[in-house]
Amino acid sequence: MGLSPEDAWNRGWRQTVAILPVFPDPEKFREQAMAFESDQYLASLTADLATWQKVSDAVGPDLFMTVVSDQFVFAGPMPDGPGFEKFRQTVEEDCRAQPRCVSPNIYRFRDGRWVIAP
């Protein structure tokens, strides 16, 4: 196609974003967790770091995300504590139940990127 690597990545990202669900207003994540469901490529939502930075700015350090499959992403506010630890077990169980688990971890948005929650 004669594209530079940068042009190819940009074109691929635009094509991927075009099939992803519309992202809600970041402020909505302050009120509740949001579930995203799609047939394919949904885990690509995690790569939109600029948008997640806006969500993190609205929610604060309690923002979490799970990606147990490429068809399901769950994100929202949840503080550390016993409820978070119980939720961690649920995420691990959900991941084991998937035909192809993406990740059994819960992530926090820190310093502009997703990291595994301690």
Image (tube, rainbow, N blue to C red):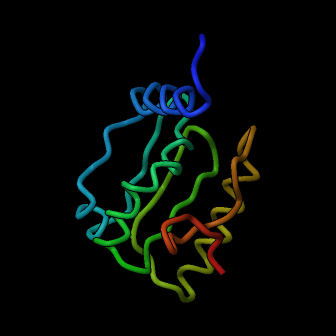
Is 66 drawn above or below residue 30 in the view shown? Answer: above
The quarter of the picture where the C terminus appears is bottom right
56 or 89, which lies in front? 56
* Residue at the image point whose x is 72% and y is 46% from the top: 101
Q: Relative to residue 82, is residue 25 drawn left or right?
A: left
* Residue at the image point whose x is 39% and y is 56% from the top: 50
Q: Relative to residue 94, is residue 22 drawn left or right?
A: left
* Quarter occupied by residue 51: bottom left
Q: Relative to residue 111, is residue 33 drawn left or right?
A: left
Direction bottom: furthest residue:
81
Q: Position of residue 69 (x, y in %)?
A: 63, 44
Direction top: furthest residue:
1
Q: Position of residue 34 (x, y in %)?
A: 38, 56
Q: Position of residue 2 (x, y in %)?
A: 60, 13
* Quarter occupied by residue 4: top right
* Residue at the image point whose x is 54% and y is 89% from the top: 81
Is 32 drawn above or below residue 37 in the view shown? Answer: below
Is 34 drawn above or below residue 110 in the view shown? Answer: above
* Residue at the image point whose x is 57% and y is 19% from the top: 3
The quarter of the picture where the N terminus appears is top right
Q: How many marks?
A: 0
Q: Position of residue 114 (x, y in %)?
A: 56, 64
